[in-house]
Amino acid sequence: MRSARFWKPACIAAAVLLALVSGAGLLPPVRQALVHFMEARYMHRALNMNYWTQQLFALSFIVFALDLLCCLAFATGRGRSLCRELAGELRSHARSLYADRKAVLILFCLYAFGMLTVFRANYYYGAADDLYRAISGARAWRNFYRYISHFLSIFVHTSPKLFDIAPFTQLLALLVMALSAVLLIRLFVPHDVPGTEAAPGSGAAPAPAAASGTVPAAGTAPAAAPAARPLSPFVYLAAIPVCLFPYFLENLSYRYDAPYMALSVFFCILPFLFTDRLRIFAPVSLVSLFLMCLSYQAASGVYIVVCAFCVFRMWCRKECSLRRLLLFILTAVAAYALSLLIFFAIFNVQPTGESYVDKNFFISAFPRNAKAYLAQIWDDFGWSALKIAFLFLLFFFVLLSCRNSRQKRLATLFVSLLLIAFSTLFSYGAFLVMGRPLLEPRSMFPFGIMLSLMTLSVAGWTGPAATPGTAAAAGPAAPREATRGKPRGWLPACGRAVIVILAYSMLVYAFAFGNAQASQKKYTDFRMTLLLEDLSRIVPEDQNDIHIHLLSDIDHTRIVRNLATTYPLTTRMIEKLGGHAVIFHLQDLGFGIQAETDKYTPWDLEFPSYPLQLNTRYHTIYAKDNVYYVYFKNPPITLRE
C-alpha cells in the first residue's frame, strides 16, 4: 500500500512535467531559444534555424503524444481495461508465433538463400546513401522524420556513429520479413484441423480468431485450441514474394536502411491480428501506422492491401455480418486516414532544401500518378517468366476464389476482380495523391505484398483442408473443400504449379540481380582506380582545395544490360555511378576533395578557358587552377550473337 501511495503521485507528477516540457517545445519562441542555446554553448557555429526548429517541433510532438497516450491508457478505467485486453491478446499471439518458430526459421533460411549472391557482391547500394554512411558514420534519417531508423540504429550498431556491419543488418531485415510472412500465413492460410484439440505438451498455441477465420460471439467461451497442421511446402513457396519480390530486393540491398524498411512492413501487418476485436484493432492500427511513418513511409500501401484481402476473406467465408464488415472497413479507413494526416500535417516531410518527393497532397494528381505507377509496373518486367506467371496467377486466383467462396459465384467473381484492381492501384499508398511521387522500385514494393497475398490465398485453397472425417465437426456451413482431404482436379494442381513457377522465377532473378551487382561493383572499382591514378598525376601535390565537376555518369556493365533485356527494372535498381557517389568513392580511396556535380550533355561542353589535361579511352579531364571537369566516356559495346 505504501509503495502504491508513493508511485501513483510520482507517476502523475512525471506525466504532468513531461507534458509541460514537451508542450513548451511546441511553441516557436521556445524552439528558437533552444537553437540559439545550442549554437552558443555546444556547436559554436550557426545552425539552420528552419531545420532545427522543425526537428524540435517533431520531437516535442512525439513526446507529448506519447505522454498523452500513456495517461489515457493507465489513468482511466476504460484505458486500463483496454490495456489488459490488449496484453492478453498479445500474449496469445506471441505464444502462437512461438509455436510457429519452425516456420519462421524455414522462411528465414529460404530468404537468406535467395540473398546469397547479394551478400557475396558486397555492393554499396545507393552509394550516396550506403557509402556516405560508411565513410562519415552519420545516420541522417532525420530529414524525413524516420526517427525509428535514426534512434534504433544506435542499438543495432552499438554506437551513435554508424559503421558497416553488413550483412548482419540485412539478416535482421530477413528475420523481420520472415516474422511478417508467418503473420500473413496465419491470416490467409488456415492450417488448423477443425474439431481436434492440441495435445497437452505439444507446444501448439491456441490459434487466434483472426487466423483461424472465426469470430467468437460476445459472451461465449473461447473454443478449444485446434491442433496445428504442418505447413505445406507450397505455403513456403507462396511466401517467397513477401521478401524476394524484385522491388523489395532494392530495399534489402541497402545495408543501413534494410532492417527499418522491413520493420515498416511488420508494423502494417500487425494490426490485422486483431480483426475480431475492433476496440483493439482501431488504436493498434493508429499507433502501428504512425510507427510505420516514423520508419519508412513508402510502406503505406501495405496496410491498404492487407486490409482489402482481409475484407475479401471475411466476406468469402461469411465470418461476420455485413454490418460488422462495413464497421471494420470504416474503422480501418479512419485509422489510416487519421494517422497519415497527422503525420503529413504535423511533420514537414522535407525540412529544408529540395526533395525528390513532394509532400503536398493533390487529389487532382491521382489520375496522373495512378497511370504512371501502373505503366511503370507493366514496363519493369517486360515479358519475363515472372510477368507471365503473374498473369496466370490472376486467372487462377479468380477461379479458385469462386470455387471456395461461400458466397454466390457470380458475386465472388465480381468482388475478386474488384479486389485485384483496387489492390493493384492502391498498393502505391499515399504516393497516389502526392504532387511529385517516388517511382523508384524501393517505393513500389507493396505491389509484391499484394502478389504474395494472392499466392498465399491460392496455397490455402489448394492445400489440405480438413482431414477426412472432420466434415461433420466443421458444420454444414463449411467450405466445399472441407469435406475432402487434399483437393484434387486440374484447378488446384494448376494453382500450385503457378506458385512454383513464380517462386522459382523470383529466386532466379534474385541470384541474377546479386551477380549483376557484383559485375557493376567490379567495373566501378576499375573506373575509380583509373580516375584516381590520372588525378594523382594531374593534381599538384600541394593543392588541397580541389573542386571536381562531374559531367556524366559511369554506365552499366554488359552483364547488367543483358539482364535488363528480360527484366527492364534492373537498370533502375542498379544505378549508374555519378554525382556525389563518385566523390564518396574517391574519398574512400583517400583522395580528399570537395565536389560539385554539374550535369551537362557532351555536345554542350565548351571550355574555351579550361585546357584539356587528359583524354583517355575512359574519361576526359579539363582543368584550370583548382577546378577540374571530368567527363566519363561510355562507348557502346556491340557483341556478336
Image (tube, rainbow, N blue to C red):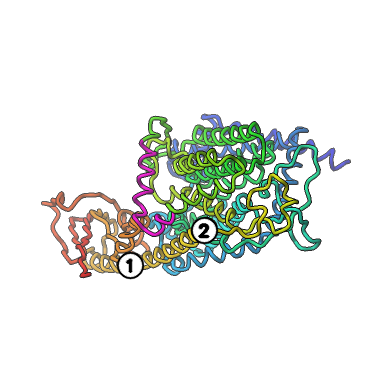
View extreme (right): residue: 1
Check residue 29 for magenta coloring: no
Return the disc, 1 or 2, that comes first in the chain's sequence: 2
Q: Tell me, yes or no, if residue 145 can be seen here.
A: no
Of the pair 554 and 393, the residue shown nearer to us:
393
Q: Is residue 181 left or right of residue 48?
A: right
Left or right placement of residue 402 versus residue 383 in this view = right
Q: Would you say residue 379 sits in the magenta stretch?
A: yes
Does dot 2 land on a helix, a strand or a loop? helix
Which residue corresponds to the image point at 65% horizontal and 64% vertical from the top-left? Answer: 102
* Image spot of residue 15 (x, y percent): 70, 36
Q: Position of residue 186 (x, y in %)?
A: 64, 52
Category of crowding for the residue at label 1, using alpha-carbon neighbours closer than 10 angstroms: few (below 14), some (14–19), many (at least 20): few
* Vertical placement of residue 366 versus 592, above or below: above
Circle 1 is placed at which residue position?
Answer: 525
- Three-letter residue code for mark 2: Trp
Q: Nearer the viewer, residue 612 or 473?
A: 473
Is 551 placed above or below 22 here?
Answer: below
Magenta stretch in the rendered image? 368-390
Give the Cα separation between the discs numbered 1 and 2: 52 Å
Q: Which residue lies furthest to the front in this view?
A: 489
Task: Point out which mark residue 490 bears.
Answer: 2
Q: Which residue is drawn at 54% across and 62% down?
A: 171
Q: Which of 91 and 473 is in front in this view?
A: 473
User: Can you tell which quarter of the image residue 50 is in?
Assistant: top left
Horizontal relation, residue 384 to residue 106: left or right: left
Q: Where is residue 66 in the image (x, y as percent from the top left)?
A: 64, 38
Instruction: Indicate the quadrant containing the C terminus: top left, top right, bottom left or bottom right.
Output: bottom left
Mark 2 nearby-residue class (10 Å; few <14, some 14–19, many ≥20): few
Please identify the quadrant where the N terminus is shown.
Answer: top right
